[in-house]
Image: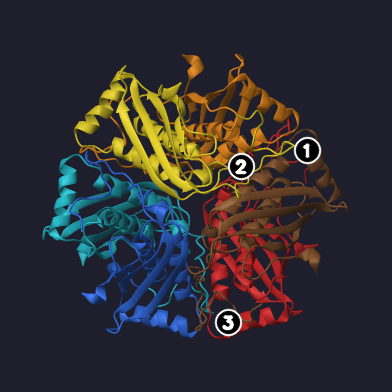
Chain colours: A cyan, B blue, C yellow, D orange, E brown, F red
């Protein structure tokens, strides 16, 4: 890996990375994160799901839509044509809230880690929004890239480490 | 506080909360979060700042712009006319990365916690984007609301607790 | 009612209607529309719902989000601070598809018919998108304003007529 | 054609269709729809056109711009690089309003029916907006795909049937 | 007038100006600008207008829509509820191109100069876009605020000076 | 070069140019423009920069983000996947303000002059916004394309002429 920031020039100015000479390849990235909440909050969300409610669907849809807008939110991200965005929400084994896992695929010149992370963050924010009236102490945490494949820097996965 | 999700109706369907009958009041909210990174990554960002570089400015600007788009990202958030958005980025005392603190003010019918959280999340994502080429193990964490004032549910702050 | 287009000046040029001198009042509007489809298509959607699937939730969320973007899609619409957007999807009595009904509320200087219609149209488009692989002959129809209240032109409802 | 919804997984959850393995091909789609109105309303629009007015141009431009935003409005649509968007508005033979016809072309991995339909719907909504002050009983109807070419599911046209 | 930048804090960091304590007042602003072009280019645009063509209408609509997005383009601008946006395009007396004049009105806590300037700039850009295939030497120039009324800094107009 | 507007059909109606049959090639475009201001205004901006302030960074970031939204602002522009956007701001030799120079690169079917011009215009507008409280007589001027390479119409540069 490099030791210098790639998004700044020699004078320290922020700028996009020119990807003109990179090949178009199939690329994927995965990200994950969690929202921690009180037991009663998780119970309310679980209860909504049992009633065929929309809370998890709304959060997933928000995550998918946010992935498509990543380049519009993150100043130096390149616009990309995405092939797929997946968002999964599951209860944590420790009962302390929900885990979110996302994966994004493209055929492009740059990786899609930021798209996977943005989908994850906005899914978490949407869960927060829907539960905030019953729990003001929720916390979003552990948001990170979990895997990456298809670019020049090589494939890797958190699980390999 | 309530025990039921406010953003779902009795059938469990997601829906906006009707705020027609709420008064317009001055409201503020604060949020915070952190991005954890390797020492060399933090050193690269610090070095950029010493060179009058743009990394922190880019992240702050992204956060401010995201706050203004919160209702466009979070499905059931109300559009709001924001009076102020502030984003501060500081090195953590433990040297493990950067803390982000945001505050948002409005004159409106609903609170601005989601705007403060969205600003915080997108600031963190932008920092991640600019440093990801030198550190693939960064993590965004501890994203939460830190204070709220001006609404019917009463003023509060994490520091009071 | 008037006999001249309000969104064009005397030379015929399109322009916004200046609402500076209109009072801020509580306003609501309702709209409805339908998507007609084959019986097997409706069965597939019904089956998804029975499985606690997301098809209807996705369409409702898309409608709510579109309402908030109405002024960004319809060139001469005024930006508005919406208080509430509701979207309901129901099977038609004749079994030929789904009906969509929307309602929108604001405290503003202009009516929200366009917001209600835009929510309705985008909900229908989203339903179309999700079912198009099994039915290429769907049709969206009967999209209209069903009620309006709170503006200078008086309250009315299709049901009154 | 298929019998199952393609935008939901086995658990019924909404998700994008992964198009990673689809080839990039030239694709086109056409859509049409109508707005029905009173004779005096149509006369006012016709009069505007005779005066070289902008009503039809405004609606066409809104339709073209909406096509480019389809993936931002319809949650599970893929972002696409569009090659062409055309919008035509013509008086109906029965004198009851206006017909809108759209066509969209891309070089991509998915079809552009949704882009053609979205352009058509937003063109109709814009016509509605500009005439609504003189006619509150307009109706948008018969919005459907009229032709499709270039994808794996084969070329077809409503006229062939 | 002040001598210090209002959009930076004492450390020089960019930030929004907090308008929480400003009153909501009726505000207007006007802006103007020009696009200079070859005689044959102006002739082609004039010819289009004589044919009831859409070139000027397209540019005006783009300007109106851009005004509504000002706060989404200019990082530190406040979101505003606009009451009116007007865009006029006229041939220059010297025959060297087109002049654009815009005016914007709001009831809000901040002025609308940026909205008037943004409408003007995007109108000019759209004219450029439509004529660029026949004239690569066009130039956009003299873009400035021409009048302002309704804020704490007092009313003024370029004509007064 | 042509003598007719390419963005209008024979009836004068505005429409996109169909680029389906154009090859995907590497394309670049450069643009420049200036903002003229009082000496004290320039001094305030210079002072901000000396303090490691954010004024120039904010304007550059706004320009980069605007380039990515060009097709969403200019009605008949094609959406493009951009490879690079660069924005530079420098003091003018005559001391009367700042010059902005932009360059944009894509691999696509159409040129990127509009992206370069849009980046330039929004950078200038952002500079205007941040300095407007101390100088109401600033002016944006000389906005033009300075070079273009990679398309069917041949490479050229203002410097060659």
Residue at left 34%, top 38%? C60
Disc number for residue F22: 2
Of mark 2 and mark 3, the one earlier in the sequence is 2
Residue B113, by quadrant, is bottom left
Q: Which chain's residue wears label 2? A: F
Which residue lies under the disc numbered 3?
F49
Which residue lies under the disc numbered 1?
E49
- Compared to residue B37, the image places residue C53 above or below, namely above
Is the residue under label 1 in contact with that under label 3 (CB below 8 Å)? Answer: no
- Compared to residue C114, the image places residue B30 above or below, namely below
Residue at left 49%, top 35%? D118
SS of the residue under disc 3: helix
Residues at marks 3 and 1, CA–CA distance in whole angstroms: 47 Å
SS of the residue under disc 1: helix
* Residues marked 2 and 1, same chain: no
Quadrant location, the N terminus of chain A: bottom left
Disc number for residue D62: none
Outermost residue to the left: A94
Is the residue under label 3 in contact with that under label 2 (CB below 8 Å)? Answer: no
* Residues marked 3 and 1, same chain: no
Residue at left 46%, top 36%? C149
How packed mark 3 is, by other alpha carbons closer than 10 Å (few <14, some 14-19, many 20 or more), is: some
Give the tally of numbered discs: 3
Residue at left 19%, top 31%? C50
D64 and D9: which one is in front? D64
Residues at marks 2 and 1, CA–CA distance in whole angstroms: 29 Å
Is any atom of residue F6 visible in this view? Answer: no
* Residues marked 2 and 3, same chain: yes
Residues at marks 2 and 3, CA–CA distance in whole angstroms: 44 Å
Q: Which chain's residue wears label 1? A: E
- Compared to residue B155, the image places residue D115 above or below, namely above
């Amino acid at each position: 890996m490099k030791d210098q920031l790639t998004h700044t020039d020699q004078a320290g100015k922020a700028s996009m990375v020119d990807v003109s000479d990179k090949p178009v390849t199939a690329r994927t990235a995965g990200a994950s994160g969690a929202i921690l909440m009180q037991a009663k909050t998780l119970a309310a969300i679980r209860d909504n799901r049992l009633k065929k409610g929309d809370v998890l669907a709304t959060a997933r849809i928000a995550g998918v839509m946010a992935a498509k807008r990543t380049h519009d939110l993150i100043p130096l991200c390149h616009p990309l044509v995405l092939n797929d965005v997946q968002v999964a929400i599951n209860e944590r084994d420790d009962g302390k809230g929900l885990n979110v896992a996302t994966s994004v695929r493209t055929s492009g010149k740059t990786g899609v880690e930021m798209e996977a992370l943005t989908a994850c963050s906005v899914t978490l924010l949407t869960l927060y929004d829907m539960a905030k009236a019953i729990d003001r102490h929720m916390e979003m945490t552990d948001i990170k890239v979990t895997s990456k494949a298809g670019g020049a820097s090589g494939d890797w996965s958190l699980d390999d480490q």
